[in-house]
Amino acid sequence: MPKDNLILIKNIQIYSEDRFIENGYIIMKNKKIIEVGVLSDLENDQDYQIIEVPSGFIAVPGFIDVHIHGVNGADTMDATKEALDTMASALPKEGTTSFLATTITQERKEIEKALINAGEYMKTQADQGKAEVLGIHLEGPFVNAKRAGAQPVHHIIDPNVSFLKEWLALSNHSIKLVTLAPEQPNGLEMVRYLKENGIIASIGHSDATYEQVVEAIEAGANHVTHLFNQMKGLHHREPGVVGAAFLHDELKAEIIADGVHVRPEMVKLAYQQKQREGLILITDSMRAKCLKNGTYDLGGQEVTVKDGKAVLEDGTLAGSILKLGQAFKNILNYTGCSIEDAIQMASVNPAKQLNIYDRKGSIAKGKDADIVILDHNREIFMTICRGEVAFHKEDDIK
């Protein structure tokens, strides 16, 4: 390793924060990007560890998944260091360099175990070579049983600020996003509390009317959990949650672009309505991702995975097995959007929503060296997490 741990990526097309560089270079040091430029301006490359990539490959900022339950046999609700390690190690293969460990509606003690575990993990997680846990997405139990989906109905409760305060303390204040149904008793009180404490209040698993969503926005809600799925849909006499999401720029909307949860035409409609600034690509994936067809657990429920679908016994969709790198490709194909647009939805918007755009979400000097290199087919070729190669396709094949 050269002195000062200087790493150079060269001969790469770069989608940097403020421009596209046809033949560029990126210099990294101590987990940070210290220079981005045009290769012809680089005076000397002898002091660097050099990462060479094939001609025509592109560098984009690392993807940020704000809604993921599990992958490769592990789940946030396992409440073990090993489970989060497994997730952090597996996610760079799909271009994800940071994520929110996402819980599910469950009995209180099980949620608390997961919160404590994630909070502790964040204190000691490996600095490099793995995706970074940025915090916790608390999905449930403060949702509407009418829109439960795969959230276990018997553990759903009304929004409870006292519980939330306790959970924040238990998690070492690592809860960054809460999915709730604002129309439920005490829902608006919880939205206001989240807003006051800098936590994203997300409308999801909700049967709210348009007017109730507007009230929630006024109280501080600024996010929608998996648009279209398990929410009051669009109707010409009742716009519902979907209509409110379309009409209010205050709301950033997650979308599962797998063609299963939302068919491609509806993804395109959402993109036309929300534009690139309004959507956030997520996976909502469960532990079966990266594994074979079979039977798996999600929140204590049996989930059958077959041919790209994860369903409960009654056929209800139960999370996904979508990879974020595939969602990136899908949004390009479904909508005809540009690479820059897809970057906005996979990296920029989640970073801005989490208020970490000062260090993540784009390729720029001073930011974390979270970089994804895509091949000519827009497949993941290499993922760099905080300056260290966490995935290399050629190593994976061997």
Image (cartoon, rainbow, N blue to C red):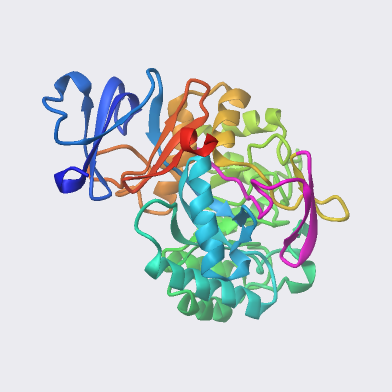
Q: Residue furthest front?
A: 398
57 relative to 6, above or below: above
Q: Nearer the viewer, residue 62 or 357?
A: 62
- In-image side of 316 versus 79 (left or right): right
Where in the figure is residue 147, as x and y percent of width and height? 76, 57
Q: In this view of the protein, can residue 277 be seen by the observer?
A: no
Q: Nearer the viewer, residue 189 or 150?
A: 150
**Residue at 38 percent of width and 68 percent of height:** 124
**Magenta stretch in the rendered image:** 278-307
Q: Quadrant of residue 367?
A: top left
Tell me how many marks there are.
0
Where in the figure is residue 17, as x and y percent of width and height? 31, 34
Q: Nearer the viewer, residue 213 or 4?
A: 4
Q: Residue furthest left?
A: 43
Q: In this view of the protein, can residue 87 be seen by the observer?
A: yes
87 relative to 8, above or below: below
252 relative to 275, above or below: below
306 in magenta: yes
**Residue at 23 percent of width and 50 percent of height:** 30
Where in the figure is residue 33, as x and y percent of width and height? 25, 42
Where in the figure is residue 266, as x and y percent of width and height? 69, 32
40 relative to 294, above or below: above
313 in magenta: no
- Figure quadrant of the N terminus: top left
